[in-house]
Amino acid sequence: MLFDRSEIIETLRMLQIQNLDVRTVTLGINLLDCRGVDLADTASRIIQKITRMASPLYSAVEEVSSKYGIPIVNRRVALTPISLLLNGQESQPEILDLAYQVDRVAQKLKLDFIGGFSSLVHKGFTPADQLLINQLPAVLSQTERLCASVNVASTKSGINVDAILTMGEVIKSTAERSANRGGVGCAKLVVFANAPEDNPFMAGAFHGTGEPDSVINVGVSGPGVIAETVKRNPEYDLGEIAEAIKRTAFKVTRVGELIGREVAQKLGVPFGIVDLSLAPTPRVGDSVAEILEAMGIEKCGGWGSTLALSLLTDACKKGGAMASSYVGGLSGAFIPVSEDAGMTQAVEAGSLRLEKLEAMTGVCSVGLDMIAIPGDTPKEVISCIIGDEIAIGVTNHKTVGVRIIPVPGKKAGERVIWGGLLGETVVMEVNPASGAQLIARGGRVPAPITSLQN
């Protein structure tokens, strides 16, 4: 991979002024060879393998970051979905003990997060899936770095409404169990449709069964870089803006792949993919909302926001695809409300409402992400919100996720602060008209006719 002088100078400007960073280097680890005679034996094997594979990660990332002068924000590990290692007969104390052990090893190895306390239930539950999902409120409220995800639907299989009903209960319970911290346990839980096996971003990362024994996946980020590109060219029409964004995304992706390949080489594992999603942070100048407003939207959430976001997402994907043959994960534009200062400002101003946000998720790379809702929102309404978003993903053949937090004791319009990359936000108003009778029917929504592609 060769860089010319002008490209190096422009990259340095991105780093120094425009908040460019590599958001995460994520090591995926296959645990399917860790099954033991019982869960205690399995847990011991899991911890041994994580320790063996991930011990060099922190120092390798630090060396590469120092070598190139490129900030790398997070070091993460993604595990095989833990439900695949259970038989469904384990006790609650055994599940919690496994969670504690995984959380402790993450802290010991200086990992920011470790993902994979996950289940894939898009067509139904195994006893192991049901067991693990039932323990998520306790697990997520009593650990710090452990993340979980549940895939409840896919375009090929349809929508498991029974699983969506269960997740409404799980989210509600998780928030209540972590009420003293603003329901933050829910920030470590994603409900997916069409979950990818190579996503490096938390809380949804897990190591898919089609992946190698270990692999490095990288998530880059550059909202500030893209915003600066748009602001520098106020005379451009939308086609020219798309071209400028595409060229910038190309350069950002090249940086991500360079870092990923270097870390992979140091660890002696394969390089997997670079996820070129624009992942914002609570820092000023690092906002996807700011990009949309630079394009000409008075305030994010106003009319035209979906059009602008569609252009942004498409241009990022095109630029990334030209830069690397190994683009994967989610790749597009994230719109997590609490993690994006501009999004939170738009909620506070009243221009961004939950219904408009849902419309925007039809063209972005994730879904309803890091949204605070009133703590007294019924679990059935939470399930309906999940169901609406999941339907968007299934119908449009795209990955969507829901990371929603019913903040105990908070009402619409009140502020909640989680800190760090999770940021802070304003509790969004929820439409009081309920679809409880619909969602209570349960069952499985058949896959759309467009799934029949063979």
Image (cartoon, rainbow, N blue to C red):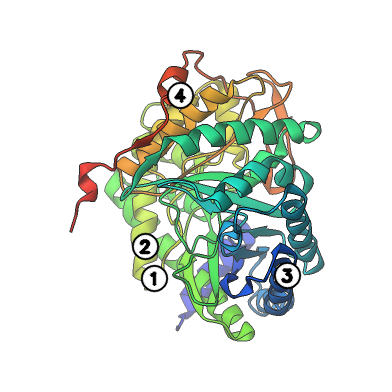
**For the residues marked 3 and 1, what is the alpha-carbon distance in whole angstroms?**
44 Å
Amino acid type indicated by mark 1: Ala
Q: Position of residue 313 (x, y in %)?
A: 39, 49
- Locate the C terminus by quadrant: bottom left
**For the residues marked 2 and 3, what is the alpha-carbon distance in whole angstroms?**
47 Å
Q: Which residue is mark 2?
A: 319
Q: Position of residue 1 (x, y in %)?
A: 45, 83
Q: Is residue 426 left or right of residue 261?
A: right
| Disc 4: CA contacts within 10 A as few (<14), some (14-19) or many (>=20) | some
Most extreme residue toward the top is: 433
Mark 4 near mark 2, Cβ–Cβ under 8 Å? no
Secondary structure under tag 1 reads helix
Number of residue marks: 4
Q: Which residue is mark 3?
A: 41
Mark sitting earlier along the chain (4/2) = 2
Residue 86's image quarter? bottom right
Q: Nearer the viewer, mark 4 or mark 3?
A: 3
- Please name the residue shown 65% across and 39% down the image: 186
